Each structure stands twice: as structure tokens, then as C-alpha cells.
Image: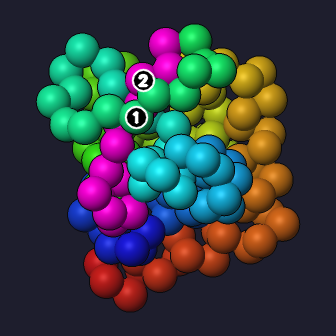
Amino acid sequence: MAIELMCKYKIPASIVLAQGLLESGAGGSQLAKEANNHFGIKCHSDWIGECYFLSDEENGCFRKYEKVEDSFEDYSSFLYKERYSSLFMLDIRDYTGWARKLQSCGYATDKFYADKLIKLIVDYKLYQFDEIEKSTE
């Protein structure tokens, strides 16, 4: 699915996979298991779908999805907000640039967020999925 989203939205598959792994605890977080939210996307004022509340989070209203695939699709659309527009000026195979830019655009408050994404990409060789697009261009 990450490769399909890469081809459709021009977001590196490695970034999709690393963020999904990090944000959901490899699919084991409460939010992932009970709300199918693998990217920690909060409700925000424009959200019209179901909500899932985590009481231990500030502004603990998160988007709830019917199925996991909906989370991945919504995440991809979410990155098309003006706030993240500078991401799409980067090369699709520049996962390091994408990770750093996601952090600087404010996707997460963790000051080590980019480093964590890069480590996941390198450790699990997720960058190899970014190369698959070459055969579809």
C-alpha cells in the first residue's frame, strides 16, 4: 500500500512506512488497534469523521478510521495541506530530507522525530521501497 500511495501522492514509501511504524508502535498502540489510526493524526477542526479520545494526551481527540487502509489514505491527503507543501519540492528518494522537513514543518513535537524516522528507514532498509517507483515511471 505504501508503494501505491507513493505513486499516487508522491510521498516516499519509506517515509510512509517509517511514520506508520513509529506512530503506531508497529501497529501495537492503543490508537492503532482501537481506532485504526497509524499516524497519530488528531481530529482538528476540519475533521468530520469519527473520533477516538485518549485521556492521557493534550488535545486527545484523534481521527478514527473504519479500516487501516483509510488511515493510510487520509495520512497521504493530510500531507497535502499548505503547512507541508515544501515537502513536495524534495526528491521522492530523499528520505533524509523528507524526515527532516516533516519535523521542521511541525508534524511531531519530538525533537528527535526525524532521527527516529531515518533510523527506522536504515535499520529496516525501507529505502528500497522508494526505488520501486522507477519501474512505474
- The three-letter amino acid code for the residue at tag 1 is Tyr
User: Which residues make up the magenta segment?
Assistant: 59-71
Query: Quick check: is 55 in the magenta stretch?
Result: no
Residue 32: where, in percent of width, then height?
A: 53, 53
Secondary structure beneath label 2:
strand
Residue 38 shows in the view? no
Q: Of the numbered discs in the image, which one, if any, rests on residue 80?
A: none
Task: Determine the image quadrant of residue 97.
Answer: top right
**Mark 1 crowd level (few <14, some 14–19, many ≥20, 10 Å Cα):** some
Asked if residue 80 is positioned above or below residue 119 in the image, the reply reads: above
Q: How far is mark 1 from mark 2, CA to CA? A: 6 Å
Q: Camera-side residue: 130 or 52?
A: 52
Residue at 55% from the left image edge and 76% from the top image edge? 129
Secondary structure beneath label 1:
strand
Residue at 19% from the left image edge and 21% from the top image edge? 46
Residue 127: where, in percent of width, then height?
A: 65, 68
- Residue placed under numbered mark 2 in the picture: 61
Label 1 close to label 2 by CB (< 8 Å)? yes
Residue 103: where, in percent of width, then height?
A: 62, 27
Position of residue 6 in the picture relative to residue 32 (left or right): left
Q: Residue furthest bottom?
A: 135
- The three-letter amino acid code for the residue at tag 2 is Cys
Query: Quick check: is 64 in the magenta stretch?
Result: yes
